[in-house]
Image (cartoon, rainbow, N blue to C red):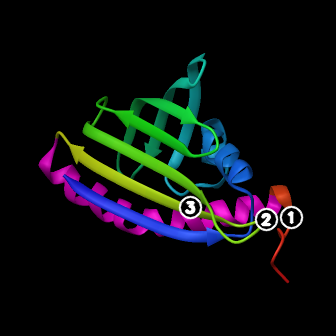
Amino acid sequence: MSTHSATRILPYSCEHLFDLAADIESYPEFLPGWVEARILESSGNHLRVEQRLGLKPLPLPFVTTAFLDRPRTLSIHSSDGPFRFLQIEWRFEPADPGHCRVVLDFNVQLHAGQLERVVTGLFDHMSPEIINRFDRRAHLLYGAGPGTR
């Protein structure tokens, strides 16, 4: 199993950043590698989501279950498709006034050993890039945020 992590303090409220992370259907609009994300079922604080990563030469379709605890955590799990185990954990912790510490952890294990090397390399690159993309998306949706100049 490979583990990947990224942390950053962003100039937005934890509620705004949580909502951005919980909008899984929008991931293909701004996240690298995401081709499709469609909510299959929504029940209280649980979502079942069909997703597809577009890795060349083959797409990786899978279904996840997301557990939402607004505005603190978003946990996404799967053992579908190529994943023996996938866990994506978002944590949102208040920081300076108007800021939020975002912690993103990925734990990934695939069924196919050869594919695992490719996907591990992708997630090594993707963890910090996903936070970069969330920062840009938050800026687009919410403006520069307090505390930025």
Which is nearer the N-term, disc 3 or disc 1? 3
Q: Is residue 106 magenta?
A: no
Q: For the residues carrying marks 3 and 2, which lies nearer the camera in this image?
A: 3
Q: Which residues are magenta?
A: 112-140
Tell me the crowding category of disc 1: few under 14, some 14 to 19, or many 20 or more residues within 10 angstroms, Cα based.
Answer: few
Residue kind at label 1, given as amino acid type: Gly
Secondary structure under tag 1 reads loop
- Name the mark on residue 139: 2
Q: Is residue 127 magenta?
A: yes
Residue drawn 30% across the image and 55% down it? 119
Tag count in the figure? 3
C-alpha span from label 3 to label 2: 15 Å
Which is nearer the N-term, disc 3 or disc 2? 3
Dot 3 and dot 2 residues touching (CB under 8 Å): no
According to the picture, the residue beneath numbered tag 1 turns out to be 143
Residue drawn 49% across the image and 31% down it? 67
Secondary structure under tag 2 reads helix
Looking at the magenta stretch, what is its main secondary structure?
helix
According to the picture, the residue beneath numbered tag 3 turns out to be 102
Dot 2 and dot 1 residues touching (CB under 8 Å): yes
Q: Does 114 appear above or below 132?
A: above
Q: Position of residue 142 (x, y in %)?
A: 84, 58
C-alpha span from label 3 to label 1: 18 Å
